[in-house]
Image (tube, rainbow, N blue to C red):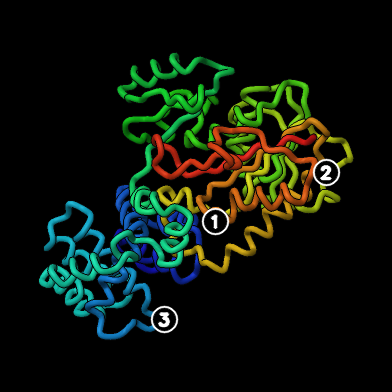
Amino acid sequence: MSGTANPRAAAARVIFQVTEERRYLDAALDEVTGATAQVDRPLVQELAYGTLRWYQQLDGIAHLFLARPLKARDRDVHALILVGLYQLRHLRVPAHAAVDQTVEATAALGKSWAKGLVNACLRASLREANRVAAAVSASDEMRFSHPAWLIARLRADYPRDWQRILEAGNARPPMALRVNLGRLSREDYLALLERQGALAHAHAASDAALVLDKPLPVDRLPGFSEGLVSVQDVAAQIAAALLDAQNGERVLDACAAPGGKAAHILERAPEVELLALDIDPGRLARTRAGLDRLGLAARLLAADASKPTEWWDGRLFDRALVDAPCSATGVIRRHPDIKVRRRPDDLPKLTETQAGILEAVWPCLRPGGKLLYVTCSVLGEENEQQMRGFLRRHADAMPEPAGCAGARIGRQILPGEDEMDGFYYACLLKR
């Protein structure tokens, strides 16, 4: 692939794949950096993540200085301009170096003809700073760097908190850990970190949670390969406690990959009989690798949770976790590509899929059993509205308080709230 030897060109290639081909950021980054020098990979990651984090803002600025949109075959040049603008606006790179090195990256893309265009656009953004500032302040899409459709949804759902949610989506997320309490205490693991010179603090939302003061590469986490600890956001760790599976019970994890919640269930109750499903065999393989690293056992099956004839043997479950496919609008700070890959017309299909899984799993749960519905979304139609619709259809379903306030069903955690990602939880008891 052209351009991978130059870190700015490599980042532009990643952004092109995400914005034009709707690839996942992590997948595009893995492919591109595979041909990039090891020393340049952190820079490529910073440029790719940062440019996508501020994409709507940077794209709006670029259009101020482009006489006409670039042709489809030259959208990698457009991506390179955004990489240059990201350096100028959000990194401590001297302006002359950011401009010069970004201009030189056109050759690595095989687009030397664009040197003048890239140079002119970047220098104009510096020269006409007042024009840029006025454009950013006049547009919510540019100011908050989120797509207009999502801003509108958040304003409707959260009239008091929408700006805070958008600002949290642009923040760099903390790195949280889940200590394997079956192997050692949280305090003992804190001591291991301190001996390595890493600082962290315990989080009250989960008895296994630690939040690092500064992120660490996974291979520098003490005992990671031995299964002492896993990387998992604190909000995601709440699931296992709410499900409250007990040893000897039969448990279904209907949408298990990549497996963090399944592993946490087993760490808390290693003698549950756990069936972990996922529709994607590749992602299910990651679940198996994670369980193997932790020394945990479960039955894994590649199957569609909405089609029980593919996976259910007729024996009822005591507990069911439905960590449903969703818009992922609560984890944008970790996955900024969501801002450009997600479309408003995705929502009807997602809510239909969520309802289909709930309808399929509910008959597999015994009377007196518990279903925990989870999303990493902040949109009401995927969360409380989805639950209200389910309760209208099922007289034998009763919501269990799970940190809910007043008449609300379930608990909505907003992005950035107490260092956590945006998650929704609702517990349903079967009468």
Q: Name the residue under label 1.
A: 327
Q: Can you tell which of label 2 and label 1 is closer to the viewer?
A: 2
Query: According to the image, label 3 marks what residue?
Result: 72
Of the residues under marks 3 and 2, which one precedes in the sequence? 3
Q: What element carries label 2?
A: helix
Task: Tell me which residue sits at (37%, 34%) in the image.
Answer: 216
Type of the residue with mark 2: Pro
x and y percentages locating residue 403 in the rendered image: 55, 33
Could you tell me which residue is drawn at 50 percent across and 36 percent down? 235
Residue 363, position as x, y percentages in the image: 83, 43
Rendering coords of residue 103 (x, y %): 21, 70
Label 2 crowd bin: few (<14), some (14–19), many (20+), radius 10 Å:
some
Q: Which corner quadrant of the image does residue 259 belong to?
A: top right
225 vs 431, nearest the viewer: 431
Quadrant of the rendering where the N terminus is positioned: bottom left
- Which part of the image, by quadrant, shows the C terminus? top right
Residue at image location 64% in from the left, 48% down from the top: 324
Q: Is residue 21 left or right of residue 383?
A: left
Query: Which residue corresponds to the image point at 20% horizontal and 64% vertical from the top-left?
Result: 101
The crowding category of the residue bearing disc 3, from other C-alpha atoms within 10 Å (few below 14, some 14 to 19, many at least 20), is few
- Amino acid type at mark 3: Ala
* Amino acid at pointer 1: Ser
> Which circle, 1 or 3, is nearer the viewer?
1
Give the left or right position of residue 52, taking residue 118 as reference.
right
Q: Which of marks 2 and 1 is nearer the N terminus?
A: 1
Query: Where does the image place residue 92, in percent across and percent down from the top left?
Result: 17, 51
Where residue 363 is drawn, which disc sits there? 2
Q: Is mark 3 on a helix, strand or loop?
A: helix
Residue 45 visible, this angle: no
Left/right placement of residue 119 relative to residue 210 reads left
Q: Up-down: is 282 above or below 64?
A: above
